[in-house]
Each structure stands twice: as C-alpha cells, then as structure tokens.
Image (spheres, rainbow, N blue to C red):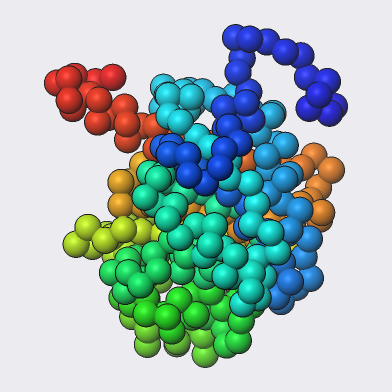
Amino acid sequence: MSPASNTHDPKWPRADGWIVPSPPSTPSDLALIGVPTFRTAITPTGAHATPGAVRSALHRFSTYSTSHGVDVRSISAVDLGDVEDPDGPQGEARVRQALGHALDRHELLIAIGGDNSATYSVMRAVFGEALSECGLVTVDAHHDLRDGASNGSPVRRLIDAGLPGASIAQVGIADFSNSAEYSDRARRSGITVIDRAEVERTGIADAIARALDVAGGDGREVYADLDVDACDRAVVPGCPAAAPGGLCAAELRQAAFLLANDPRVRVIDITEVDATADATDERTVRLAALLVLEAAAGLAMRAKEDRGHTTGGRG
C-alpha cells in the first residue's frame, strides 16, 4: 500500500506532517537534515537514497509515544533538506557550510545518512574548533578506526582532528566485526568500549548511561552516532555490514530515546542504512524512521520535564 492510499484521519496525525521544510535560518527545537554519503563505503551501498526513504516512511507512523505519554508535536521541528553530494573534501565543505551554525538555532540536530563517513563531516561541521571540548557516543558494531578516509574511518579521523579518545564511548562493539589491531588502537586511544556481550549483561539503558558519563563528563556537549548495523541482521537487512547476534530493534530505539533525552546530546546521526537493499517490507528504513521519532520523543520529554520543574509538578 502506498502512503498516498492510507486513510486520512484528522485524529491520527502522521509524523511526516509534523516536520516542516524550512530554510537553515529558521529556529526550532529539532532539525532534520539528510547527509547522503555513499561514495567511500568499503562495501558498495545505495545509502544516498536513504534520507528520502526515511522521510517517506515517517508517513506510516503517528506522533504519539504511548510509553512516554508525549506527542512529539509539542516541540517544533524543521526539515533542512539534503546536503548535495556530501562525499569527499568538497562534499565535507558543503556539510560545513550547511551546518556550521546549526547548534545556534536548534536544540537537537538529527542527521540522516548516508554511510558512516557522515559522522566525521557532521561532527566537524557542528563543533568546529571546539571539537577537543566535546564527546562522542557511538552505537555501532565497529570501531570505525580504520586507516584512510571511508565509512570505516570516521572515529579515527575525528581523533586525528582533535577529539580526545578519552571522551569517546562505543556501545555494541561486536565480535568478529573488528580486527585485533584496530581493537588495540581503540584501547591505546583511551576509548571506552562497551561491547555487545556487556550490553546483554547490563542492559542498553545502563550502557547508554555509562557512555554518556564518559562522553559528557564535565558537562561536555555530545555527538551520538547510531549506526544501524549494530542491530541483528534479521532486523536490518538493509545494513550491508550487519551480522547475526546484534542488538534488537527495541534496544536501538531505546538508545535513541535515552540519548536525545540527555541535554548534553546536541546531535544524533542515523547511518549505514541502504534503502535500495532493504527487504520488501522496508523494515530497515522503518526502523530508521522510528529512531527519528524516538529521538524526538526524548527531546520532547526534556521539555515536558523542564515545564514540570518550573511549575512544581509533572506535565
């Protein structure tokens, strides 16, 4: 069934109607932008098709979170469109031009990739010369510490650009998805690694809380990378590098909510979804759309809790 054929119900507002296309200068609580990187991916990908596919998938969902009792329409949201051809040095310059002042106008920025190389260009763009004063949380099966410039190297490139390894926490690192040499590089860089087995033992909420304590220590602003291939391959067939035994969809959704609910988190990216390789039921793209909504709910709960503190009660 195409989105256009869905029955219109004014009492069931759809999520795609809540995010309003606007120019970059428009202030809002939340801003969405597509960063469709794909040219340097180690495995060939059609991830450049993903931002548009995620926007379309939002039509399938409402704006209300039952478990948190919050409607994301309570916060303002704008769609800044896509960065044109964001790959390579010139593309990274276009990302900087598009996002250089984004955090002055928006409380939370959500960047939809694109492959994982988007993490480097977006974080460099929004934090600029203050990179050394920020933190990074990745939810990912991989360290992304490879040599060179690809979707396997954004974390190494950020460290080379001044991001302290001690301010990086990686959640969900998987067995047989990294080499001994790059795992040793993570240790030598001072990165905190919370691997998949530890997430299973302690739970995703504890893992995210620990990661935020590392990345956001001393009140540092935090960038969060949600690499969807951290999930089990059965859940995300549209993620080329996903393997059996990864996180479940509910865990990644909870991570998105918890990250966005923390005021230190200013940017979340959603990467490594190849919309052209998805299952016919679009389960990977739909999960990416739900990550947008979970993050929006986390941000909306911030505002709701702030109002409750101001009035002396709960919203």
- Image quarter where the C terminus lies is top left
Q: What residue is shown at x 52% (from left), y 65% (from top)?
A: 96
The answer to whether residue 216 is left or right of residue 151 is: left
Farthest residue in the bottom direction? Answer: 181
Q: Position of residue 201 (x, y in %)?
A: 41, 57
Question: Where on the picture, by quarter, is residue 133?
Answer: bottom left
The answer to whether residue 137 is left or right of residue 279 is: left
Q: What residue is shown at x 77% (from left), y 65% (from top)?
A: 45
Q: What residue is shown at x 57% (from left), y 88% (from top)?
A: 147
Above or below: residue 74 compared with residue 224? above
Q: Position of residue 127 (x, y in %)?
A: 39, 64
Above or below: residue 172 compared with residue 206? below
Q: Position of residue 151 (x, y in %)?
A: 63, 73
Front residue of this view, candidates 35 and 298: 35
Q: Position of residue 308 (x, y in %)?
A: 23, 24
Instruction: Confirm whether residue 167 shows in the render.
Output: no
Front residue of this view, candidates 235 and 19: 19
Question: Where on the picture, by quarter, is residue 98?
Answer: bottom right
Question: Where on the picture, by quarter, is residue 229?
Answer: bottom right
Farthest residue in the left direction? Answer: 312
Above or below: residue 236 compared with residue 241? above
Q: What residue is shown at x 43% (from left), y 84% (from top)?
A: 160
- Image quarter where the N terminus lies is top right
